[in-house]
Amino acid sequence: QVPGRAFAAITVAPALLAIAWLLPGTGMLLAGRLLPRPMVIIFVPLAVVLCYLAARRLPVSWPRFNEAAPDAAPSVRRGPDVPPLALFALLVIAVGFGLWQAALRSEQVFVTSDPGVYLQYGYWIAAHGTVRIPESAAAFGTTGLGGLSGLNFASPGFASSGGSLTPAFLPGLPLVLAGGMWMGGLNGALLMPAVLGGCALLSFAGLVGRLCGAWWAVAGELVLALALPEVYTSRTPFSEPLDRK
């Protein structure tokens, strides 16, 4: 039973940790008071409580009902326990995928597409704790040159309104990138997509394992790890790996 319980806990832990990070982060960001120390103080006990409460009721496999006797009460057939080797294979694939993506990560920093917007969004809130970005014409040397003539602050992913810029995306991924920024600066933020990609593989393996079995979970995780969409979105800041958890 121990490998089965470990399988159930490991495959749902990424989603629980994401919830524990995003709930207080979103509230603090709305208040304009996103700070690293309060975030950690709230995140750690909340993550422990969520993981503890969820682990008490996590199924290793979902019930399968016998369709041979529709008039009778459904009989539940539970799948066999998870082999330790299958659990080990799941972890090896997830960790290896994360290291592979970290080594080949794409450093899309400038705002030319979604990854650059997400990264700049996370960079700003990590340093300033608020969503709104003030427009500063003086930073562009417009003083004495006709004011704001010909200067437009709006860009892809950022809307200009009331003298400030507001990101057009939801703050989920930027909050995760902000955590990476606090731990390791810009390089730390650029490594977070690889971490999210590995966690997404574990969550997907949990779904396949509960539907089909432990070894099918290994096969499904390996197929997803080699799929081009997963490889592409785990090398640069995209929201899809976080959404999949």
Image (cartoon, helix red, strand yellow):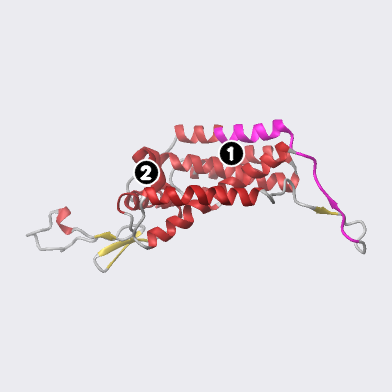
Q: Secondary structure at mark 1?
A: helix
Answer with the quarter of the image where residue 214 lies: top right
From the viewer's perspective, is 94 left or right of 150? right
Answer with the quarter of the image where residue 83 lies: top right
From the viewer's perspective, is 22 left or right of 88? left
| Label at residue 71 | none
Q: Quick check: 134 above or below 211?
A: below
**Mark 1 or mark 2, which has the lower sequence index?**
2
The amino acid on which the numbered mark 2 sits, given as a three-letter code, is Met
Q: Is residue 193 visible?
A: yes
Q: Which residue is mark 1?
A: 225
Mark 1–mark 2 Cα distance, whole angstroms, equals 26 Å
In the current view of this chain or complex, which residue is farthest to the left? 144
For image coordinates 87% across by 58% down, the residue present is 74
Q: How many residues crowd around disc 2 within 10 Å: few (fewer than 14), some, or many (20 or more)?
A: many
The amino acid on which the numbered mark 1 sits, given as a three-letter code, is Ala
Q: Is residue 18 visible?
A: no
**Stretch in magenta:** 73-95
Q: Which residue is mark 2?
A: 181
Question: Do tag 1 and tag 2 residues touch (Cβ < 8 Å)?
Answer: no
